[in-house]
Amino acid sequence: MIIRKQRITVVSVRKPGRKDLNRELQWLGDSLGLFNLRDKDKSCFRIFIELLKAAKLNSPMSSDQIAQKLGLSRGTVVHHIHKLMEAGIVIVEEGRYMLRVDNLSTLIDELQKDIHRMTDDLKEIAQDIDQKLGL
């Protein structure tokens, strides 16, 4: 049996006031807890954008391709890819990475379904614990 861990983080961040594609993409990533202050050169954001472009072309990418295109080390790319995979945003097929779905709206729909499944499981276990404790 394979146990897949998924960590979905949702951060309440004020939406950008001005309509600007880059700001909106940054806000989306920040709201999903993907980008943090320690990532000074915005590597994770840049990788996310590259995978978004690849999704538009339906062209999965290897970590080496991403590293070369962005001027990053393969280790940096793999580190951030794993973070994006853990968040349920990126999948790997035949050694190539791609977004889980081909557009951001569907991605949010899928994450919403994941969150509902997780909270349903949490509620079920909480009710079981309450019953065992006589609460």
Image: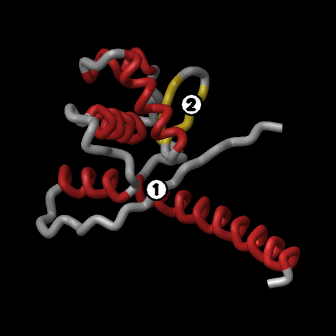
How many numbered markers are drawn?
2
On the rendered structure, is 122 left or right of 36? right
Q: Mark 1 points at which residue?
A: 9
Q: In this view, does 31 lie above or below 102?
A: below
Where is residue 35? Give x, y as percent: 32, 45
Query: Between tags 2 and 1, which lies in front?
Result: 1
Q: Which mark is residue 32?
A: none
**Quadrant of the image occupied by residue 86:** top right
Residue at the image point whose x is 35% and y is 59% from the top: 31
Label 2 vs label 1: CA separation?
21 Å
Where is residue 2? Give x, y as percent: 77, 37
Characterize the local packing of mark 2: few (<14), some (14-19) or many (20 or more) Cα atoms within 10 angstroms. Answer: some
Quarter of the figure that contains the C terminus: bottom right
Characterize the local packing of mark 1: few (<14), some (14-19) or many (20 or more) Cα atoms within 10 angstroms. Answer: few
Residue at the image point whose x is 47% and y is 38% from the top: 83
Where is residue 100? Give x, y as percent: 53, 44
Among the two numbered marks 2 and 1 on one chain, the one whose residue lies closer to the N terminus: 1
- Give the residue type that dot 2 points to: Val
On the rendered structure, is 127 left or right of 63? right
Q: Which mark is residue 92?
A: 2
Residue at the image point whose x is 42% and y is 51% from the top: 103
Q: Is residue 65 above or below residue 115?
A: above
